[in-house]
Image: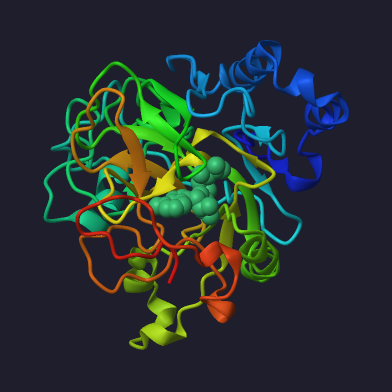
């Protein structure tokens, strides 16, 4: 019998009573201050357990607040991963914990979590986090200590699992819909911001939904297509083209503030693959970290066209189903305003 078997969440159980209620009331109520307070209260209620240290999120519209007080009531606010029936639940059976006591030592010769991390980021000494819990370098998978480890909760190799620490607000922009903005505090480079939560779908389900979203003009799909999975999977062989993305995260029906992050061609955040309580390498969490220092009130953004826009010719990561590129509404021009703007969000 497994000692550790956390609850698994399924797409079919995503709550929708609040959304149904709000969409059934008269429009003036949806535009009232009470509706904004309900939105903020729902965010808090659904997340206070998994991000106990997180500052509260505000919804702000100083662009056209008389028309739209909150984002559409179209999703359940949650930090959870909701598995579709086509996706296997987390693999706890093959999960291994380290036997360290106290706090894991970044110079340890015996910590199995450190060894695992070093398989992927061996040229960076110690864990991938520094002593302040900041990412030392982007682009490597993160293997955090997990529920089976002997170390304490305060071990430096536990960051993403402790949830958001920085203030963020969901704020209407003038030309890109809603966006996510830093609070009054600057956010240092390498800081964890949040996970891209949502429904975990098979690639086929993602493709089908992508066709609809692209026509509709807004997509919240994100492929779990990190390059390290290609480089290290022994069964992929030498031919990169043989690689198939297996899973897609969809934040349309369930998700957290990260679903409102807009694209930038010069982003201040990037996604990293992160494993906490999951032994299946195909199913990392999508963990968002700052890639430079973020100033108070600055908009947070990442690149929809790749895991990290330092690289040219990135693979698409926001699953765009680009068979109809140029025609569907989603292929609207990029309005990020960066000096090196490429002009598009999705290829
Ligand atoms: C994941 S959503 C981001 C949140 C969105 N702004 C909202 O209001 O829900 C992606 C959509 O936001 C808009 N968007 C994001 N980044 C943009 C950009 N750089 N330029 C123009 N529109 C953008 C597009 O409509 C895109 O399909």
Dividing the image into 4 quarters, which one contains the C terminus? Answer: bottom left
Query: What's the coloring here?
Result: rainbow
Describe residue 8's horizontal placement relative to residue 188 as left or right. right
Residue 49: image location, x then y, percent: 57, 18
Please report the residue visible at 37 percent of the width from the left and 72 percent of the height from the top.
230
- Number of numbered discs: 0
Please report the residue visible at 26 percent of the width from the left and 43 percent of the height from the top.
268
Q: Quadrant of residue 184?
A: top left
Closest to the observer, 232 or 163:
163
Closest to the observer, 114 or 328:
328
Residue 68: image location, x then y, percent: 63, 29
Residue 330: image location, x then y, percent: 55, 63
Residue 286 at least partly seen:
yes
Closest to the observer, 81 or 101:
81
Please report the residue visible at 23 percent of the width from the left and 32 percent of the height from the top.
294
Dividing the image into 4 quarters, which one contains the N terminus? Answer: top right
Q: Quadrant of residue 18?
A: top right
Describe residue 64's horizontal placement relative to residue 54 as left or right. right
Residue 79: image location, x then y, percent: 57, 33
Q: Quadrant of residue 71?
A: top right
Q: Is residue 85 above or below residue 173?
A: below
């Amino acid at each position: 019998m497994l000692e550790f078997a956390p609850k698994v969440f399924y797409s079919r159980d995503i709550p929708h009573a609040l959304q149904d209620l709000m969409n059934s009331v008269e429009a003036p109520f949806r535009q009232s201050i009470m509706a904004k307070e309900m939105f903020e209260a729902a965010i808090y209620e659904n997340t206070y357990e998994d991000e106990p240290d997180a500052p509260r999120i505000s919804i702000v519209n100083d662009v056209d607040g008389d028309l739209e007080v909150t984002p559409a009531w179209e999703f359940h606010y949650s930090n959870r991963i909701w598995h579709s029936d086509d996706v296997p639940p987390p693999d706890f059976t093959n999960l291994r914990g380290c036997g360290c006591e106290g706090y894991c030592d970044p110079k340890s010769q015996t910590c199995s979590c450190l060894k695992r991390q070093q398989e992927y980021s061996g040229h960076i000494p110690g864990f991938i986090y520094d002593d302040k819990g900041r990412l030392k370098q982007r682009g490597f998978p993160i293997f955090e200590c997990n529920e089976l480890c002997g170390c304490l909760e305060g071990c430096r190799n536990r960051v993403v699992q402790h949830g958001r620490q920085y203030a963020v607000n969901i704020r209407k922009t003038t030309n890109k819909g809603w966006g996510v903005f830093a609070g009054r505090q600057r956010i240092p480079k390498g800081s964890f911001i949040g996970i891209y939560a949502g429904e975990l779908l098979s690639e086929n389900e993602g493709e089908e939904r992508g066709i609809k979203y692209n026509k509709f003009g807004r997509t919240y799909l994100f492929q779990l297509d990190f390059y390290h999975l290609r480089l290290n999977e022994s069964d992929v062989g030498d031919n990169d083209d043989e690689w198939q993305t297996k899973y897609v995260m969809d934040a349309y029906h369930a998700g957290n503030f990260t679903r409102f992050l807009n694209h930038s061609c010069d982003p201040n955040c990037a996604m990293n693959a992160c494993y906490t309580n999951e032994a299946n390498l195909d199913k990392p969490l999508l963990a968002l970290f700052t890639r430079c220092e973020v100033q108070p009130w600055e908009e947070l953004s990442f690149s929809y066209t790749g895991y990290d826009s330092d690289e040219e010719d990135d693979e698409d990561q926001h699953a765009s189903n680009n068979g109809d590129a140029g025609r569907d509404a989603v292929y609207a021009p990029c309005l990020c305003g960066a000096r090196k703007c490429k002009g598009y969000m999705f290829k």
